[in-house]
Amino acid sequence: MITPEQGEPLPEGSRDLSRGGRERGVLEFTLAGVTAATSATLITFGAVGVHRARELRAYCDDLPIDEQGLVIDDPVCRSFTGDPVVNQLVSAGLSFFFAAPMGVASAFLLRRGLRIHRDYKRARATDLTFRPAPYLTPRGGGLTLTLRF
């Protein structure tokens, strides 16, 4: 592989992301998988939160009324920190809010991993190796040639 001299900039469009075939993009693929799984988990958590909030709202709206016309209070329908339905919806919204950029980050990492792997395969395809290896045994000697293309 021909590389520019020290300090000389690379020509435009010839950037090798695999660093001469030394990197395969495994780190980027791994991080893309982890961020995609985290994003999917947050989306699932948000969807479950929305579902629970709808069920809680329906339950609290259908509470029985006593003979004096007052709603029988249920501790599930009230909270010290505000309305439980609103709390569930805020939790779900935050889950969706953090899942979106993680999904985008996963896509960028996957794209970079694919580009690094493509450069790795290109560097390995053009890497012609010729290695002669002489050997000597008590009964004779020889030369082993290794050619990789």
Image (cartoon, rainbow, N blue to C red):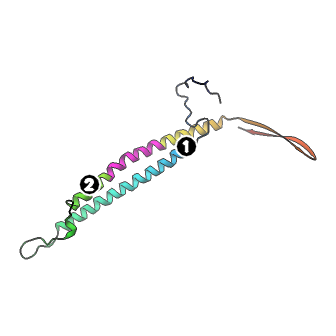
Quarter assignment of residue 78: bottom left
In the rendered structure, the answer to whether residue 57 lies left or right of residue 45 reads left
Question: Where in the figure is residue 100, as x and y percent of width and height?
Answer: 36, 47
The residue lying at 56 percent from left, 41 percent from top is 117
Magenta part, dominant SS: helix
Amino acid carrying label 1: it is: Gly
Secondary element at tag 2? helix
Give the percent coordinates (x, y) of residue 131.
77, 37
Judge the density around disc 1: few (<14), some (14-19), many (≥20) Cα neighbours within 10 Å: many
Q: Residue at x 40, y 44 (%)?
A: 104
Q: Quadrant of residue 10?
A: top right
Q: Which secondary structure, mark 1?
A: loop
Considering every residue shown, the one lying at the far front of the view is 80
Sequence order check, earlier mark of 1 and 2: 1
Which residue is tagged 1?
25
> Measured from the top left, where is residue 54 in percent x and y?
24, 61
Asked if the stretch drawn in magenta spans residue 59, the answer is no
Q: Is residue 38 left or right of residue 12?
A: left
Q: Residue flagged by tag 2: what amino acid is it?
A: Val
- How dense is the environment of label 2, judged by Cα within 10 Å: few (below 14), some, or many (20 and up)? some
Circle 2 residue: 90
Residue drawn 61% across the image and 36% down it: 122
> Range of the magenta residues?
95-109
If the image is split into quadrants, where does the C terminus sit? top right
Quarter of the picture containing the N terminus is: top right
